[in-house]
Image (cartoon, rainbow, N blue to C red):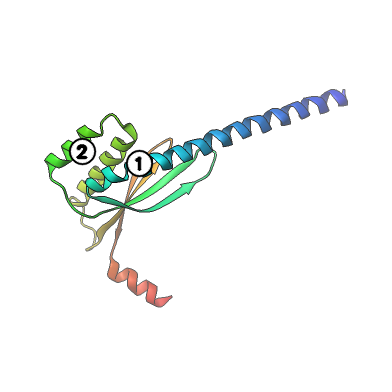
């Protein structure tokens, strides 16, 4: 009986190791593909008025990319429409552009104690999201001086 239980536990451990290896391999490939897709998308993103200022990579069971963008210049509604039409077949790029445009539009509707929208962070993963990062640079510099 004890040998049978040991064999069963050994088989379960082996199977668990195989599953974990497969998950790690798939996650690694997804991360590499996501980074490559983002890199390939940068010219169109820059044409849309945004630059990538930071990229964080979350290596986990469900890997995610956190891409931070800054709006460098505004483009017209016609230019937005043209870029979205041009990129509509690339779902990855289209998601990024739509997220950036929506976030940039929100900044015109929100006024928080003279804070400016400094960056837009897009989470690219199983459940994509956008985060708007507002800062008052004058207060941020005061905090840095205190350190």
Residue under the point 43% across and 75% down:
147
Q: Nearer the viewer, residue 129 or 51?
A: 51
Q: Position of residue 53 (x, y in %)?
A: 35, 55
Q: Nearer the viewer, residue 31 or 100?
A: 31
Residue under the point 19% across and 53% down:
73
Where on the picture, by quarter, is residue 144? bottom left
Q: Position of residue 30 (x, y in %)?
A: 48, 36
* Circle 2: element type: helix
Q: Quadrant of the N terminus?
A: top right
Residue under the point 31% across and 37% down:
93
Q: Residues within 10 Å of mark 1 (few under 14, many from 20)?
A: few
Residue under the point 78% across and 25% down:
8
Position of 9 with respect to 138 (left or right) is: right
Q: Looking at the image, is mark 1 or mark 2 nearer the viewer?
A: 1
Q: Which residue is mark 1?
A: 40
Q: Which residue is mark 2?
A: 83
Where on the picture, by quarter, is residue 128? top left
């Amino acid at each position: 009986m004890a040998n049978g239980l040991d064999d069963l536990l050994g088989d379960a451990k082996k199977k668990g190791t195989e599953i974990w290896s497969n998950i790690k391999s798939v996650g690694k490939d997804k991360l590499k593909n996501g980074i490559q897709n983002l890199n390939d998308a940068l010219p169109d993103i820059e044409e849309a008025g945004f630059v990538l200022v930071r990229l964080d990579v979350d290596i986990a069971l469900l890997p995610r990319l956190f891409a931070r963008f800054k709006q460098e210049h505004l483009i017209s509604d016609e230019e937005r429409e043209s870029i979205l039409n041009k990129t509509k077949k690339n779902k990855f790029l289209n998601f990024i552009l739509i997220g950036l445009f929506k976030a940039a539009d929100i900044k015109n509707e929100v006024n928080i104690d003279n804070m400016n929208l400094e960056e837009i962070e897009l989470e690219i993963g199983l459940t994509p999201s956008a985060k708007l990062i507002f800062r008052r640079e004058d207060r941020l510099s005061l905090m840095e001086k205190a350190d």
